[in-house]
Amino acid sequence: MADAQKQQTWTPGKKLTGAALTAFTAATVALVAPVLTEPNEGYSGPVYKDPAGYLTQCYGERQVDPSVIYSKSACATKLRARMAKDYGPAIVKCVPDFTAPAHQLAYGASIDVSYNAGPAAFCRSPMAKAFNAGRWTAGCKAFPGWYVTSRGVRYPGLVRRRGEEQSFCLTGKQR
């Protein structure tokens, strides 16, 4: 996010709301979706069953339409829109300090994990608890090992993804 835009949308001690929160979330999603979610979920225009047996489409989307095969571009647009509309705002409710630009990387990694595990699960996570206690580094370090199983099966892809979210949270880069 450009420095001028940061100055217009946030000042220390002020929480983002309305249009400023929407702009901040959109910028964060634009930053995180191509780096974390797209490579981890992988693209599939037609519906398929994921390793846990859920019907899935695009980049891990569970709101599927079996009659439509989406292009990669349409799936990327759908992903960013869902993250910005449904996932980002939901996790800001449980970790209000995400709206500080200094916490944009933690917010981005958390949007990714909530896209994967759900906002309610994220809000109960050790990451959210640490972030709310002001322990941002500890929150970032809590990603590995959290929700790397589904239906009792440990998935190497989820282990890798949590490590990448941790790295992104701490540095803004994948490992």
Image (spheres, rainbow, N blue to C red):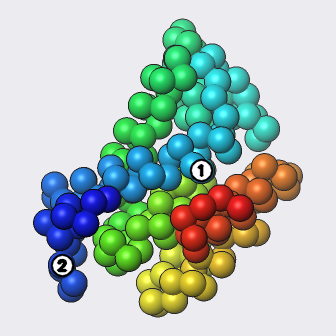
- 175 left or right of 122? right
Can residue 90 be seen in the rendering of this structure? yes
Q: Is residue 156 above or below residue 140?
A: above
- Residue appearing at x 16%, y 55% in the figure: 19
- Residue appearing at x 37%, y 38% in the figure: 81
State the residue in front, 99 or 93: 99
Can residue 96 be seen in the rendering of this structure? no
Residue type, label 2: Thr
State the residue in front, 74 or 175: 175
First reached walking from the N terminus: tag 1 or tag 2: 2
- 101 left or right of 158? left
Residue type, label 1: Leu
Task: Report helix, strand or loop for mark 1.
Answer: helix
The quadrant where residue 154 appears = bottom right
Query: Label 1 crowding class (10 Å Cα cut-off): few <14, some 14-19, many 20+?
Result: many
Residue farthest to the front, as pictured: 3
- Residue appearing at x 25%, y 66% in the figure: 3
The spot of residue 2 in percent (x, y) is: 27, 60
Image quadrant for the N terminus?
A: bottom left
| Residue 11 circle label | 2
Q: Which residue is mark 1?
A: 36
What count of labels does the image hold? 2
Q: Is residue 116 above or below residue 91?
A: above
- Residue appearing at x 57%, y 70% in the figure: 171
